[in-house]
């Protein structure tokens, strides 16, 4: 925790979900820690091991020794359940979840944190808008993403141009209020097989709005990972299924 063990000194919690990330997690944690230890505030890094079959949890435990954070070992229920567990375990005044592939540079954390206020308790990285950039993204995936966002804005969260960027920050009270209300990927989610990328971000942002929180987008630089776990066919199905379920839940008043 950057040398401070008192929870009330923590300013930032960084949640990193990880599933079979033994190859790139060492470099990721080295980069994240090297940046955060130079900042003038207390922090913790929470790696949520999503039931990995490799040495992900052991590597994270070794890299985070010395009070820099902790590892949560969860059953393999997919990224959504892992993010939920980490966000609800966080103690920092600001809570960020980010992807293990560092698609958005960790240096963006302070720019986003400066935007989190009482008025803007939820600030999300966006790959759309002035100041954002996309590097290395296949054209087909970009087209699929734009079609998905059109559906998302039509059915769930109008006005948000990029719900799926994996770099989102919440004020602590907002994180606890939102993630404790998730219905699709809660603590009773079934164990899954293989990587599972879903549309849980849409539910997160819709719940945030139903809680009365304003969601602010912050354009960020983003790089497509060559080792991405996204499966265009399978994950398009899961995203559409989740979007329809979120729409149905909202129509029934479950998020109010």
Image (tube, rainbow, N blue to C red):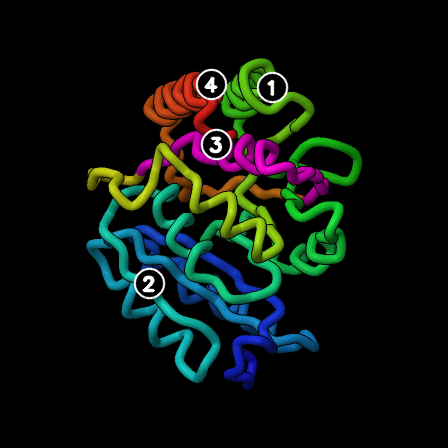
Residue at left 60%, top 51%? 170
Quadrant of the image occupied by residue 235: top left
Numbered badge on residue 228: none
| Nearest to N terminus: mark 4 or mark 3 | 3
Q: Secondary structure at mark 2?
A: strand
According to the picture, the residue beneath numbered tag 1 turns out to be: 153
Residue at left 61%, top 64%? 93
Numbered badge on residue 203: 3
The residues bearing labels 4 and 3 have C-alpha atoms spaced at a distance of 9 Å
| Nearest to N terminus: mark 4 or mark 2 | 2
Q: Secondary structure at mark 1?
A: helix
Q: Position of residue 73 (x, y in %)?
A: 28, 61
| Nearest to N terminus: mark 1 or mark 2 | 2
According to the picture, the residue beneath numbered tag 2 turns out to be: 72
Q: Is residue 50 left or right of residue 123?
A: left
Crowding at dot 1, Cα within 10 Å, few <14 / some 14-19 / many 20+, comes out as: some
The residues bearing labels 4 and 1 have C-alpha atoms spaced at a distance of 11 Å
């Amino acid at each position: 925790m950057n040398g401070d063990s008192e929870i009330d000194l923590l300013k930032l919690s960084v949640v990193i979900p990880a599933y079979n990330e033994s190859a790139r997690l060492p470099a990721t944690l080295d980069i994240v820690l090297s940046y955060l230890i130079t900042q003038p505030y207390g922090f913790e890094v929470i790696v949520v091991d999503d039931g990995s079959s490799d040495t992900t949890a052991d590597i994270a435990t070794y890299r985070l020794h010395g009070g820099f954070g902790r590892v949560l070992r969860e059953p393999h229920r997919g990224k959504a359940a892992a993010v939920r567990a980490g966000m609800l375990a966080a103690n920092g005044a600001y809570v960020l979840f980010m992807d293990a592939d560092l698609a958005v540079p960790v240096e963006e954390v302070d720019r986003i944190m400066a935007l989190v206020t009482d008025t803007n308790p939820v600030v999300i990285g966006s790959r759309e808008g002035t100041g954002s950039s996309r590097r290395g993204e296949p054209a087909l995936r970009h087209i699929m993403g734009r079609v998905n966002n059109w559906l998302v804005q039509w059915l769930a969260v109008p006005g948000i141009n990029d719900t799926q960027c994996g770099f989102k920050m919440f004020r602590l009270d907002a994180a606890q209020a939102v993630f404790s209300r998730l219905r699709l990927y809660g603590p009773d989610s079934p164990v899954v097989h293989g990587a599972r990328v879903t549309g849980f971000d849409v539910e997160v942002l819709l719940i945030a709005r139903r809680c009365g929180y304003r969601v602010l987008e912050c354009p960020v630089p983003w790089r497509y990972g060559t080792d991405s776990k996204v499966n265009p066919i399978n994950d398009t199905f899961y995203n559409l299924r989740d979007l329809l379920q979120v729409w149905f839940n909202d129509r029934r008043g479950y998020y109010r």
